[in-house]
Image (cartoon, rainbow, N blue to C red):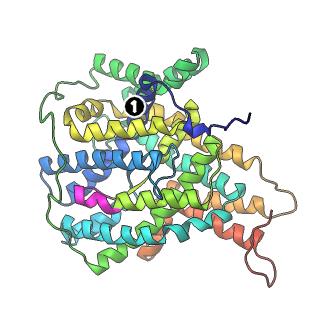
Amino acid sequence: MSLTRVRPEDTRYPAGKTFAWGLQHVLTMYGGIIAPPLIIGSAAGLPASDIGMLVTAALFVSGFATMLQALGLPGFGSRLPLVQGVSFAGVATMVTIVSAGGGLPVVFGAIIASSLIGLLIAPFFAHIIRFFPPVVTGTVITIIGLSLMPVAARWAMGGNAKAADWGAPSNIGLAALTLAVILLLNKLGNGGLKRLAILLAMLVGTLFAVVSGKTDFSAVMQGEFLALPGVMSFGLPVFDLAAILSMLLIVLVLLTETTAGLIAVSEIVETDIDGKRIASGLRADMLTSALAPLFNSFPQSAFAQNIGLVAMTGIKSRFVVAAGGMILVILGLLPVLGRVVACIPMPVLGGAGVVLFGTVAASGIRTLAKVDYKDNMNLVIVATSIAFGMIPIVMPAFYDQFPGWVRTLFHSGISAACLVSVSLNILFNCLKRGEAIRVRS
């Protein structure tokens, strides 16, 4: 009798463990998911109550986007453990639109139109999978991890550069404590403790922060307990051609980054991925991005930091990620729970981020170790691509004097490394004199 092999991502766990591990995903990405609405809302000059609405909307929409990506519907969703959230890639462009006097209705109109275009081109975009051999995927995964390290460092320093305790030894010490607990649990703990190491370390770090006066929960009970998401609370979307064209370039970056995220998580999960599966993932990405403005939110994309959590814990189940998505939806409906999560100090997240993001980079290095570097240009491809990926990280102002479309494409180290590595791989490994593009086996 033949047995059907269960794919790693289809593994199911008891409900208690599933939601505990799902909560780890939420805590890992919470700081990143609320930052874009805070920045855009502040640029739009909104009052605190409206900015709070943008934050809860971001949680709500990202939760549904995550569940769609992980669980899937016919034609939509990769059915991989990939967390979705509001992307940072378009923040600068959206702030520019808002600052130019367009307001949120113009931003939302541009997101809807550009995301629908992205939805149409997603199947064609997915065919670039054949140009992603290990020399490319390993490079991109490595840069995903490295590009996130400044985020971990900022969190460890306190998260707010204008705060009086920015970079204080007490902040960095709290991050170090969280990191030490993670390492200790991974060294001495059993399988269950290792899988919950991030959650438990954050709990220990937060309790220590309460005792030492670094955080408190006094504001948790202030404000609404239940808040249903609003629909077009800032008015009907306005479709401005210039704004749409600006956001369309962002959509191309999002498609590139999500493709890289899908490939990265498939490598870590050790499951098969093809153009059809990538197309389904990209369609889910674009559909939720197009619908997000209706609920006062912004474009969705894969959250790279959560790929590190999958790699570190070894929990490859998409149902765990879907549970995290459900928690995000609940946080969007229950602001009181969001306020509880918001009390976790940034340095605690920073201590966890060091391990999580480093794990992503290490996974990329492991993939690069499988590449053949003898009598070919692969070493040059890797070296050049990593260099281009690192430029925006070590020198963020490098492209400031270039045209806007160049800044948009190369300001993200992930998209820069992806574009360069794919281009060089085509040039050196796929093209032969006078022949059409083909991929060598």
Q: Is residue 357 magenta?
A: no
Q: Nearer the viewer, residue 15 or 406?
A: 15
State whether residue 392 appears in this view: no
Please tell me which residue is depicted at 41% across the width and 25% down the height of the picture.
202
Element on which disc 1 rests: helix
Image-quadrant location for residue 203: top left
x, y percent for residue 311: 58, 37
Disc 1 marks which residue? 23
Magenta span of residues:
290-298
Pick the front one: 212 or 356? 356
Looking at numbered disc 1 in the image, what kind of residue is underneath it? Leu
Q: Is residue 168 above or below residue 78?
A: above
Instruction: Report the quarter where the N terminus lies.
Output: top right
The residue located at (15%, 41%) in the rendering is 227
The residue under the point 38% across, 61% down is 287
List the single residue furthest toward the bottom. Answer: 434
Residue 31 vs residue 106, the one in the foreground: 106
Q: From what the image shows, is residue 381 above or below residue 153?
A: below
